[in-house]
Every structure is written in C-alpha cells, then in structure tokens.
Amino acid sequence: MTPSFGLIIVGDEILSGKRSDKHLPRIIELLAQRGLSLSWARLVGDDRVRITAALREAFEGSDAVFCCGGIGATPDDHTRQCAAAALGVDLELHPQARDLIEARMRDLAAERGEPFDPQRPDNVHRYNMGVFPVGARIIPNPYNKIPGFSCLGAGGAHVHFVPGFPVMAWPMIEGVLDTDYAHLHQQGASQERSVIVFGAMEAALTPLMEQIERTHTVKVFSLPSVDHPEYGRHIELGVKGPTSAVAPAYAEMLAGLHRHGAQLGPEMVRP
C-alpha cells in the first residue's frame, strides 16, 4: 500500500512569528519533484504534552511522516524525548550517532588547532544529540554529520526526525525520499489541468463537479478568487489525478462549462 505523506513542524518560534516557516512549501516541492504529494501538515509549539500527542497519533497511523525541529540538546528541544514517550520506549545513545558526533567534534578541534578532548564538558553534552528512542535508525546529515533518526510505529508509520534548520533538514529529507521511498517515485504519472472561469458561482457548477468525480478516477477542485490582480472575480476549476484519467475528465468538464455558457479564460497544466 502506498503511504500518505505527512509533516509535523515543531517550534515556538514559528507560532510566535519570530521566524516564518519555510518547511511546508519546500517539502511540498520535494515531494512533487518525485510525483508524490503531501496529505497533511501540523504545527506544534515546544510543549512536551502536545508534541507527544502529535507523535503518538502519527505512530498509530500508517503514513510516512517528516518531523522538523526540536531534536537538539538544549532545554527547549523536546522532540527526541517526546518520540520515546509516544512509542513507550527508553532513550539510548545510538552507537552510530555517537561515532558521527565524535567525528564532528574531532573535525571542529582540528579546525581550531586543538587536541580533541572527549571529556570536555561541552563535548560530553554534544553526545546527547545522539540519544534516540530505542530501535531508531539514523538519518545521515551531509551538512555537519550530526544525524537525525527514524522510528517505526505500531500502526506501520515511519516517522523521520530532522533538525529545524532548512540547510540540514532538506537534504536529509531528500535522502530519505530517494532511499526509503524511491520505489514510489512516479514522475509524470499524475497531472493537474484547470481553467479560469469568469462570472460563475460555485453552487451552479457543483453538479458538474460531482458528475465528473462519479465517472472518472480524478479529484475536482475549485479555487474561487474575488480580488485577483489580473482576472478579478473568478474561479479556477480543474481536475487532478492519474495522467491517463485527467484528459477525458477535463474534456468532460470543458464541455459542461460550455453548456453552462461559462466565459473561460486561460488554461493551465501542472505535473
């Protein structure tokens, strides 16, 4: 069964407005490049109860979920602990993560021209970034070697945890998509076609939309706008789904619009 994809974004800084979220549009883009799509997204602040609840719900499902943020080792980072609580398992220092973190610390010491001291308090603390739920596997981090991790839930969900920093998170997510989900890539297998409709009301077009969904394996969408700078008041009406099904469904939609006497504008095709 092909999983649906979900996204959890963790961080008070997004909810407070200190930072604008960049993950949602980028993850949508990364999935679309591979013929995949995002089914849902959730934003949670740095609250252990809420993070744990969101992760428990994810683990109980069957989706592939990316979770961005909160996997560091400062007092406001709770995601690693919440993942363990949601799974009902302990936390442990992952041996491969430990080795990668130590390699990073050795690199930093060499850059400063200093000997590496594993017992220095800041170095000891850095190992906490490799403390993951028991049974986790690592996600390589090409930016600075400090890994993320993936966990399997009881419902079959795979939740993939990456840092909140886009420069780290996005390459890590691409790596997961191109390894764990490479068999699902379907570039060109789906399509979206739509047309601008002037002067029509959604209620009047609803029967046509329902008829198309009954007779074709596509989804129909309607995006109304009242103040578009170019088209003014209009509806973007379209169909999306398997490429082979979109063409006949779209042709039927256009025929129906012509029967309604609708005034049509530009047409659009998107992968």
Image: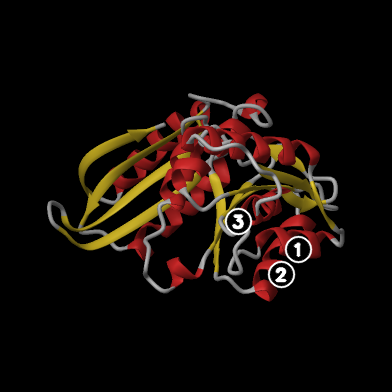
Give the CA separation, mark 2 to mark 3: 20 Å
Nearest the eye: 57 or 52 = 52
Q: Is residue 175 visible?
A: yes
In the rendering, which numbered label is found on residue 53?
2
Tell whether 29 sits left or right of 105. left
Amino acid type at image mark 3 = Gly
Amino acid type at image mark 2 = Ala
Amino acid type at image mark 1 = Arg
Give the CA separation, mark 1 to mark 2: 5 Å
Identify the residue position indicated by label 1 in the image.
Answer: 56
Q: Which type of secondary structure does the marked residue at label 2 adopt?
A: helix
| Badge 1 vs badge 2, beta-carbon distance below 8 Å | yes
Q: How is the image coloured?
A: secondary structure
Q: Which type of secondary structure does the marked residue at label 1 adopt?
A: helix
Q: Quadrant of residue 59?
A: bottom right
Identify the residue position indicated by label 3 in the image.
Answer: 72
**Nearer to us: label 2 or label 3:** 3
Task: Tell which circle, 2 or 3, labels the residue nearer the N-terminal end.
Answer: 2
Nearest the eye: 23 or 143 = 143
**Nearer to us: label 3 or label 1:** 3
Q: Dividing the image into 4 quarters, which one contains the N terminus? A: top right
Residue at x 67%, y 72% (from the top left corner): 48
Question: Can you say whether 148 is above or below 199 in the image?
Answer: above
